[in-house]
Amino acid sequence: MPQEIRELDPTTVERIAAGEVVERPASVVKELVENSLDADASRVRVAVESGGTESIRVSDDGIGMDERALERAVRQHTTSKIRDIDDLEGGLATLGFRGEALHAIGAVSRLTITSRPRDGGADRGAKLTVEGGDVGTVRPAGCPVGTTVEVDDLFYNVPARRKYLAQEATEFAHVNSVTTAYALANPDVAVALEHGGREVFATTGRGDLEATVLDVYGREVAEAMIEIDGAAVPEGPLEDVSGLVSHPETNRASREYLSTYVNGRFVTADAVREAVIEAYGGQIASDRYPFAVLFVEVDPALVDVNVHPRKMEVRFADAEGVREQITAAVEDALRREGGLRTRAPRGQSAPEQTEIAPGDRADGRPDRGDETDSTAADTHSEGGRSSTAGDHDSDNERSMTPSEAPSDGGLSTETSNDGPTESVGTPSGDRTGTAESSQPSHNNSQPEPAEQTDDRPESPDRTPEREGSADGTSGRSGSTVETPAVTATEQRRFGDDDPEMQSFDSLPSMRVLGQIEDSYVVAETDDGLVLIDQHAADERINYERLREQFLGETTTQVLADSVEIELTARESALFAQFTEALSRLGFQAERIDDRTIEVRTVPALIAEAGGPALVRDVLSSFVERDSDAAGTVEAVADELLADLACYPSVTANTSLTDGSVVSLLEALADCENPYACPHGRPVLIEIDTDEIEARFERDYPGHG
């Protein structure tokens, strides 16, 4: 029997509609802070409990409301910000305009509004309560000038919606991000954020954007910010581009710190964000993101802000023109401050060091003109690093300031069961439990490639383990890496003799033919050809070895000198929530002050590859994973191992001997999953004979 179509009752409709505006506590904070800013507030304080799931309180010193205005404010589609559709289409001067925020919030919570108008000489204010959509009576109340909105028990009457709220730390991370975004957008407003009675950050409201960045992100980030010169913006749809962006070396693994604003409105417009990232080019890895506080001004008629109920997305009439202007403005700022390196040797980022004289080679050496092509393989030593293509800065490499280098020299190994410790200073081949020791032997004899084009994620605060002094040492205090001397005649190169068919346990039998671009192994099988991504293959091998070590016993390394790490306000709040989880991974750290932690031990597996500052990325991973505590730790550990597997893996653009390729394939065949790297990319691609014949059109009519 067909189901009867019926009209929903008003209460149900209200609660469904409220879900479009109020998705989580951060949605409530966003709407209320926007109201405060629209009310000409000079001070805004946000205080939440349990990540905002239990209570949210936003107070301001704005123009306030009298009893009549207060009663109207909680009705649906009532607003003082627009009059009709003409105001909406002609461009908005306010952050809010829909007239449904307070109504929607009141429908799914216990809402209390207390307000007193700034003008009119009222000696007292008024209070109104709304519970699950039921509006109470306006009553007199003693309160200061301005408005205070309290939201308790969010989604108490929508159990299904409340059930799917994330853990407290995740919800507060979103609240923190929203509050931070509006604090940065309004440096002339004093914005403060509390969680559980503890102040997370507070800005001065003195109109200084750099001081505001210092308040919310800390000194390390503030000192790395570069000002954008609006005069350098080319002609286009945008009237102005201004703000701050970070030096490439100061970045994070999350987009959380890309704060972009259109006509003062905090948005996540792809056209704006992607343009900022594009400006950095190969200066930061593809999975790293800069800090940015970017303001763009555009004719309101050329941008549509009425795209989504949460007003987080906008649509530009000329999105491509917007991208070009923003990219040019950010590139100019980075180049002016030496942050954008084109042909300069890696690691030299001061303005005077980025200048290349006419005739200079790409690697920074004078062009003598009498060098043959063979000299291109000569090395240019930058702290012992082999480099022949300084003009090809890869996505996965960057220079590092001394302050970022991990101070983990003179490490000692300590097991979780308080077993004996051993000093670290032995050759790398003798160490166990480190990412370095998991490196297959075929890698050790290979020269460092001049250019890397693989997709290895880059930890922001690690010293590349292949960088060292000219005498072959690692360049790390208290730790040396011995590289055995291997002559070119110890293993034959491809083409010396006819290759033999090799058999493997979980891979097809194949005859190795050679390499393409020193990155992909080409092999012949009985059914056609196989192409193997050598980096992805080695990454899978290292990942499974690391995972086996990690699951066997969590081994930590005690830092000879503990390392102090400065955190942003968001990271500091996460640290308070995940200290125990960090300890389970092997990070022993404690808080020194509100924004600084002291790291004393790190997981042995990352001691060489990641360094103590990797704790920042681990904290972000906890939030992004967002599941039960045990499951989150396991997922983050697995993600961490997948990233660490990249560091010792053979890279693209590395010439291999046939013997080392066979060793690689044998190790790959022993893996549980030899067909994909830990990040999901394919390791090998098979092209059968039928496909080859089809590509050569050998099936045309009449062909024998």
Image (cartoon, grey):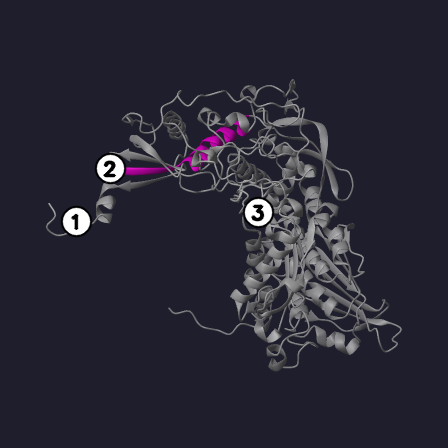
Q: What type is the residue that disc 2 sits on?
A: Asp
**Of the numbered discs in the image, which one, if any, rests on residue 527?**
2
Marks 2 and 1 sit apart, C-alpha to C-alpha, by: 17 Å
**Of the numbered discs in the image, which one, if any, rests on residue 699?**
1
Is residue 53 visible in the rendered image? The answer is: no
Residues at marks 2 and 3 touching, judged by CB atoms closer than 8 Å:
no
Q: In the rendered view, does 223 fall on the left or right side of 464? A: right
Location of residue 218 in the rendering, given as x and y in whole percent from the top left corner = 74, 48
Location of residue 25 in the rendering, given as x and y in whole percent from the top left corner = 66, 58
- Badge 1 marks a residue whose secondary structure is loop
Q: Quadrant of the C terminus?
A: top left
- Residue 582 magenta-highlighted: no
Marks 1 and 3 sit apart, C-alpha to C-alpha, by: 48 Å
Q: In the rendered view, does 364 fall on the left or right side of 95? A: left
Marks 2 and 3 sit apart, C-alpha to C-alpha, by: 42 Å
Q: What type is the residue that disc 1 sits on?
A: Asp
Stretch of the chain drawn in magenta: 527-552
Which quadrant of the structure image shows residue 124? bottom right
